[in-house]
Image (cartoon, rainbow, N blue to C red):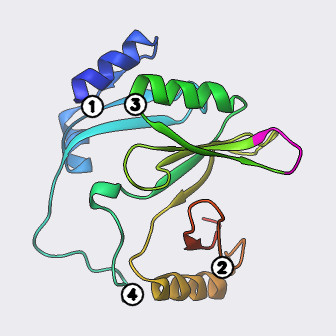
Amino acid sequence: ALESAAARLEEAGVLVTAGKPDEAADRRVMDFVHFTCPYSQVRMELVLGHERVFRPPFRPARDLAGFNTGELGMGHVVLYTADLYGAAEFYCRVLEFGVTDFAHLPNSDPFAVFLHCNSRHHSLAFMNIPGAPRRIQHVMFETVTMDDVGHSYDVCLDRGITSTSTGRHHNDRVFSFYFRN
């Protein structure tokens, strides 16, 4: 599957680079390739064989119930691009993502497209916000409980790094908040 995905990227004119063994060891994967997203200029990695660590179990610095990962992946990432339709077409055609939906303001063209590669509402999304000061809009890690979101919000609020209050998006229904890092 990794070789097939790399071949499809190369057929689409994207330079694909094989990961080095020491880099794979750092990521705790068997193998990986990387490429630069032609729509956001962000380095993307496709990996094979995540290591499963059975001992010791993950222990965060503070008490958390855990994260929704496994078959859902790590969460999602939202990138900026000037070409929403091109990015969506590329990831659907080349890497077999599906379009979940587009976000619109009333009487306007879409400003975001949400893409899925599993049952999570979206694992990858693109936003068109002209003049955005960076390439990555946000990364989301989904916790198991709403209490974890609330406790995390309190920590970020105490540190003065929140950029929104808690709320729920209309499309994915995930209860969340944003903070600066």
Number of the label disc, if any, that sits on residue 75: none
Q: Secondary structure at mark 3?
A: loop
Looking at the image, which residue is at 34% across and 54% down?
A: 73
- Residue holding disc 4: 62
- Residue holding disc 1: 19
Relative image position of residue 52 (x, y in whole percent): 15, 59
Quadrant where the C terminus is found in the figure: bottom right
Q: Mark 2 to mark 1: distance in Å?
A: 38 Å
Relative image position of residue 44 (x, y in whole percent): 44, 36
Residue 170's quadrant in the figure? Answer: bottom right
Relative image position of residue 10 (x, y in whole percent): 38, 14
Q: Mark 1 to mark 3: distance in Å?
A: 22 Å
Q: Magenta stretch: dominant SS?
A: loop
- Magenta stretch in the rendered image: 106-110
Instruction: Indicate left or right for 161 with 4 as reference.
Output: right
- Residue holding disc 3: 96
* Residue that extends furthest to the left in the rendered view of this protein: 55
Q: Mark 1 to mark 4: distance in Å?
A: 33 Å
Relative image position of residue 142 (x, y in whole percent): 44, 68
- Above or below, 8 against 120 in this view is above
- Residue holding disc 2: 166
Tag 1: residue type?
A: Gly
Mark found first going from the N terminus, 3 or 2: 3
Mark found first going from the N terminus, 2 or 1: 1
Tag 3: residue type?
A: Glu
Count the marks: how many?
A: 4
Q: Secondary structure at mark 1?
A: loop
Mark found first going from the N terminus, 4 or 3: 4
Looking at the image, which residue is at 72% across and 71% down?
A: 163
Mark found first going from the N terminus, 1 or 3: 1
User: Which one is closest to the eye, mark 4 or mark 3?
Assistant: 3
Question: Around disc 1, counting alpha carbons within 10 Å, would you say few (fewer than 14), some (14 to 19), or many (20 or more)?
Answer: some
